Image: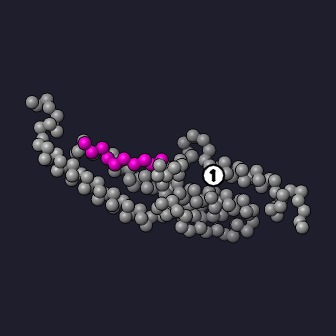
Amino acid sequence: MNDMPRESLEPIERRIARARAELEAVQAAVARAESELRSASVTTRSRDRAVEATVGPQGQLTHLRFLDNKYRNMTATQLASSVLEAAEEGRSAMAHRVVETFEPLTRPSGDTPEFGGIDIDWERLFGDALDAGGDGRGRRSRDRLRDEIQEDDADYSPGGRPRGASRT
């Protein structure tokens, strides 16, 4: 009888009580994490340091600042690229913060083998926001966008008119 697993020797009532206690502890941890994240925000800057974006816990843009009047010397497409870059960087940083907060709750419990941790579909929640692009799997979408914008800028004169177009 000593070869039987511990769970088989333990009365079912005790196992259920342990599982309930584990579930209550996880529910309390989830509530704490949600409360902590409810007021969280991340502020990031574009690479050209022209734009600062603040992103809330659900990836929403909550504040946008144009720094040092750099926007005055930028074309509309350059400014748009900087805004999108700062916002996407903030969204990615916030997604990583949410994952770091909830990831410990996804691990199996050592005390209750029946409880394998909470199951979270990170891809469904965040889409490509978690793809920080530093893993060598290809270029980030904002880099492709920046390339497209720079190509567009090459087709336009500094005043924003298509090359060869005259003022009317």
Please identify the quadrant where the N terminus is shown.
top left
Q: Is residue 130 magenta?
A: no
When asked about the image quadrant of residue 48, the answer is bottom right
Please identify the quadrant where the C terminus is shown.
bottom right
Q: Is residue 117 magenta?
A: yes
Q: Left or right: 135 with respect to 150?
A: left
Work out whether 71 lies above or below 17. Answer: below
Percent from the top left, x then y, of residue 159? 82, 64
Work out whether 72 lies above or below 134. Answer: below
Percent from the top left, x then y, of residue 88? 57, 56
Q: How many marks?
A: 1
Magenta residues, as a range?
A: 114-123
Q: Nearer the viewer, residue 18 or 79?
A: 18
Is residue 48 among the parts visible in the rendering?
no
- Residue for point 11% across, 37% down: 9
At label 1, which amino acid type do we have? Arg
- Residue for point 84% across, 58% down: 162
* Prevalent SS, magenta region: loop
Q: Secondary structure at mark 1?
A: helix
- Residue for point 37% across, 64% down: 35
Q: Residues within 10 Å of mark 1 (few under 14, many from 20)?
A: some
Percent from the top left, x then y, of residue 56? 49, 63
Is residue 93 among the parts visible in the rendering?
yes
- Residue for point 43% across, 47% down: 121
Q: Nearer the viewer, residue 44 or 17?
A: 17
Percent from the top left, x then y, of residue 59? 51, 59
Residue to which mark 1 is pinned: 142
Q: Left or right: 116 with respect to 153?
A: left
Q: Left or right: 162 with respect to 48?
A: right
